Image (cartoon, helix red, strand yellow):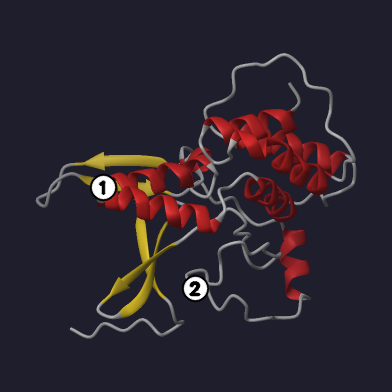
Amino acid sequence: MHSIHKLVEFGIQHGLVEKIDRAYVTNRILDIMGLDAPPEMEAAETLPPTITPMLTELTEEAVSRGLVEDTLTNRELFANRLAGAITTPPEVVRAKFRALYKAEGPRAATEWFYEMCRACDYIRVDAIAKNARFFAPSPAGELEITINLSKPEKDPRDIAAARSMKQTGYPKCMLCAENPGYAGRLDFPARNNHRIIPLSLDGSVWYLQYSPYLYYNEHAIVLNEKHVPMRICR
């Protein structure tokens, strides 16, 4: 089975894509891959547990065909476009979260949202697995020390190219509400597969998201609707 078909099937099996939208999502991927028609459908096969192998295979194909410059950042930007193509639309995510919250409570809603973020590769499951972790007893309990290996070193070519880019100031930071759906650039990560959940806290609008590089289990972030300086007031 070609990676395009595997990617779409993965999205369907993990609830990111509805079966009725198979053709629509396939066409989105074809556009990203610069193809006019999908490869012939072959016999079904067991899919990998994460989306990463399909993204890697399709990105390699795009590089070999000259669609993507062969640098780390350009590869990541392209792979994220593919992931975004099978990620549940924001309005559907919000509706599903609200429905689960109302019917089954906050635990069910947040657990579903967490698994969705893992399935679409917003939470970088395979990359996080590369981290080295060490545990030791301490007076305060078990101490965990993590060496972050999930974020590879930047390619010098990408660093040089980013320096020559015009600074846009958009999004203002990586924790702004403007990030979901952003295609990214050499000096800012892609967020095509990023989704956030609106919250009301003390009369203000906030958003719930998960960290793409979890530093602890279910590492959640709540961010303000507005880009305001972080200040400790008590």
For the point 84% across and 28% down, the residue is 39
For the point 74% across and 61% down, the residue is 158
For the point 44% across and 57% down, the residue is 94
**Badge 2 element:** loop
* Residue situated furthest top in the rendering: 43
Left or right relative to 101: residue 151: right
Which quarter of the figure is the N terminus placed in? top right
Tag 1 residue: 107
Of the pair 232 and 197, the residue shown nearer to us: 197
Q: Is residue 152 above or below residue 179?
A: above
Which quarter of the figure is the C terminus placed in? bottom left
The numbered mark at residue 176 is 2
Q: Is residue 171 above or below residue 89?
A: below
Of the pair 67 and 93, the residue shown nearer to us: 93
Q: Amino acid at mark 1?
A: Arg
Q: Position of residue 102 (x, y in %)?
A: 28, 52
Q: Position of residue 226 (x, y in %)?
A: 44, 82
**Badge 1 element:** helix
Foreground mark, 1 or 2? 1
Do tag 1 and tag 2 residues touch (Cβ < 8 Å)? no
Q: Amino acid at mark 2?
A: Cys
